[in-house]
Amino acid sequence: MTIAGVFFGVSANNPSWKIAAAGIIPVAGFWLLDSYFLRQERLFRKLYDDVRRPVVDVELFSMNVQPYHAVVPWGKVIFSHTMVNFYGALAFVDIAFIIGGIVRTVNG
């Protein structure tokens, strides 16, 4: 957020589409990083749900979440409400700065 804010601040004072376009890199990077950790959390929740039910056979003290990868796909996590609302808003602002910089460059 802070890194993207720096790019947004510089783009607001000096509308350059190149600087604004560089701002999308940390937004996308942190979106993917947060999505990774959210997916890990969801995978461990699935494992926990199976461990607490006596019907399901799970190895004792196992932390293997590999069997749950199909249940928690990347697309559902990356485009979940929390990710889209936060990082989508940042990406939208950055795209607005990019378009503003392009318009300023074209109009001279």
Image (cartoon, grey):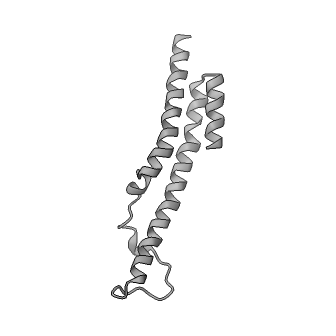
User: Who is closer to the viewer here, 53 or 67?
Assistant: 53
* Residue 60 as seen in the image, left or right of residue 6: left
Q: Residue furthest left?
A: 55
Residue 24 locus on image (x, y percent): 55, 38
Q: Image quadrant for the N terminus?
A: top right
Q: In this view, does 87 lie above or below 101?
A: below
Residue plotted at (65% across, 22% down) = 14
Residue 57 locus on image (x, y percent): 37, 87
Q: Is residue 88 above or below residue 11?
A: below
Residue plotted at (49% across, 24% down) = 99
Residue plotted at (50% across, 28% down) = 96
- Marks counted in the figure total 0
Residue 40 locus on image (x, y percent): 49, 66
Q: Residue furthest top?
A: 108
Q: In this view, does 61 lie above or below 30?
A: below
Residue plotted at (66% across, 28% down) = 10
Residue 77 locus on image (x, y percent): 42, 56
Q: Image quadrant for the C terminus?
A: top right
Q: In this view, does 79 lie above or below 44?
A: above
User: Who is closer to the viewer here, 84 or 103?
Assistant: 84
Quadrant hosting residue 45:
bottom left
